[in-house]
Image (spheres, grey):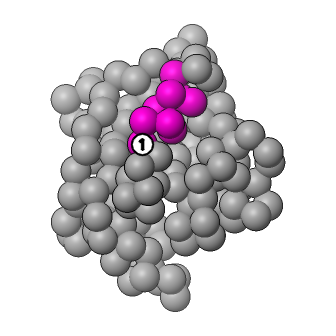
Amino acid sequence: MAQRTFAMIKPDAVAAGDTGKIIDIIEKNGFTIVGMRKANLSKNQVETFYAVHNQRPFFGEMVNFIISGPVVLLALEKENAIQAWRDLMGATDPSKAAEGTIRKQFGKSIGNNATHGSDAPETAQQELALFFPELK
């Protein structure tokens, strides 16, 4: 059964011109893109999005990074989409990510790691509702 997940191509990858390459990888790995748009997110949107991390020391830096430039927001669909997307992204730290993963190819650091993906069904549902409320 198909599952949906939320994905984001972060400002570092967008600025580097890697958006098309990442989308190509997504499609070649069997995901269907059911929603996509490029956006400059507001500070309020990003603080809401990353609210789970608001007590962490890196919260302000993370928010400032995401609002530093445009991002590409994606709603992806595939069987076992959440885990499949996380596997395709690779480890948060690009230096520890497996060969062939998106973060290994396009990430520069733990903070500038090219992509975001939902980590659980509940998170995917919340993130999709935040950025793709039209998808029911």
Hey, which residue is sitting farthest top in the picture? Answer: 1
Query: Which residue: 42% across, 42% down?
Result: 19
Front-lying residue, 136 or 89: 89
* Relative image position of residue 63 (x, y in whole percent): 36, 74
Check the picture and name the quadrant holding the C terminus: top left
**6 or 40: nearer the eye?**
40
Residue 84 position, x and y percent, is 65, 31
Relative to 55, is 97 on the left or the right? right
Residue 33 sits above or below residue 103 on the image: above
Q: Which residue is mark 1?
A: 19
25 within the magenta span: yes
Q: Who's the residue at 61% across and 22% down the image?
A: 29
Outermost residue toward the bottom? 57
Q: Please, is residue 47 above or below residue 117 in the view?
A: below
Residue 58 included in the magenta stretch of the image: no
Based on the displayed image, in which of its 4 quarters is residue 85 positioned?
A: top right
Residues rendered magenta in the picture? 19-27
Which quarter of the image is occupied by the N terminus?
A: top right
Helix, strand or loop at disc 1?
Answer: helix
Instruction: Check disc 1: other Cα within 10 Å, few if <14, some if 14-19, many if 20+.
Output: many
| Camera sees residue 125 | no
User: Is residue 37 found left or right of 125 in the rendered image?
Assistant: left
Q: Position of residue 99 (x, y in %)?
A: 79, 45
**As drawn, 100 above or below 57:** above
How far across and how far down the image is residue 78, in percent?
54, 19
Dividing the picture into quarters, in which one does residue 134 lie?
top left
Residue type highlighted by circle 1: Thr
Residue at 79% across, 61% down: 96
